[in-house]
């Protein structure tokens, strides 16, 4: 990793909740309720945590998910603007833990932690190939 990534480094990502981000389970073919699903919330939390590390990845490096632990606390209805934020809480040469949260104008939607490991792309690709 390039130098400079320290605890407190942060990133934001803002979305407007759309119908395709609502819960709709395999085979049911319908939206269960018109609010941001937990799966979509986690997706955006992982993305905003990745945005923390992106400026520091060197050529030939990549981040890989090491864990996600979140709580979904409040609904975010379709049409609502939701702000996602990630802040590095722990940084080492090969690991970055980010505190993450999502909020809109009326509530804290979710909060938790995303862990990312930084690996040489060749190592990551070899690990993936080994699982074929």
Image: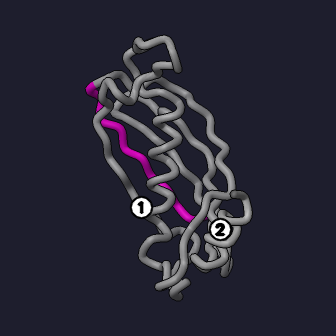
Where residue 58 sits: x, y (%)?
49, 84
Q: Secondary structure at mark 2?
A: strand
Numbered mark located on residue 11 in the image: 1
Q: Quadrant of residue 71?
A: top right
The residue depicted at 38 percent of the width and 55 percent of the height is 12
The residue depicted at 30 percent of the width and 29 percent of the height is 18
Q: Where 69 sits versus 12, above or below? A: above
Residue 91 among magenta residues: no
Q: Is residue 46 left or right of residue 125?
A: left
Q: Where 2 sits versus 16, above or below? A: below
Local crowd size for mark 1, using a 10 Å CA cut-off: few (<14), some (14–19), many (≥20): some
Q: Residue furthest front?
A: 132
Local crowd size for mark 2, using a 10 Å CA cut-off: few (<14), some (14–19), many (≥20): some
Q: Is residue 42 left or right of residue 14?
A: right
Q: Which residues are magenta?
A: 79-89
Residue beneath disc 2: 117
Q: CA distance from mark 1 to mark 2?
A: 17 Å
Judged by depth in the image, the label closer to the viewer, 1 or 2, is 2
Where residue 45 sits: x, y (%)?
50, 47
What predominant SS class does the magenta segment belong to?
Answer: strand
User: Which quarter of the rendering shows the C terminus?
Assistant: bottom right
Residue 85 among magenta residues: yes
Earlier in the chain: of badge 1 and badge 2, it is: 1
């Amino acid at each position: 990793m390039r130098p400079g990534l320290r605890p407190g480094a942060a990133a934001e990502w803002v979305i407007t909740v759309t119908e395709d981000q609502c819960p709709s389970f395999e085979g049911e073919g319908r939206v269960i309720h018109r609010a941001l699903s937990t799966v979509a919330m986690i997706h955006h939390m992982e993305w905003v945590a990745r945005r923390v590390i992106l400026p520091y990845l060197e050529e030939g490096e990549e981040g890989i998910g090491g864990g996600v632990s979140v709580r979904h606390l409040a609904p975010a209805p379709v049409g609502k603007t939701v702000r996602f934020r990630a802040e590095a809480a722990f940084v080492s040469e090969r690991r970055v833990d980010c505190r993450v949260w999502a909020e809109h104008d009326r509530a804290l939607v979710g909060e938790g932690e995303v862990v990312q490991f930084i690996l040489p792309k060749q190592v990551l690709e070899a690990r993936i190939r080994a699982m074929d």
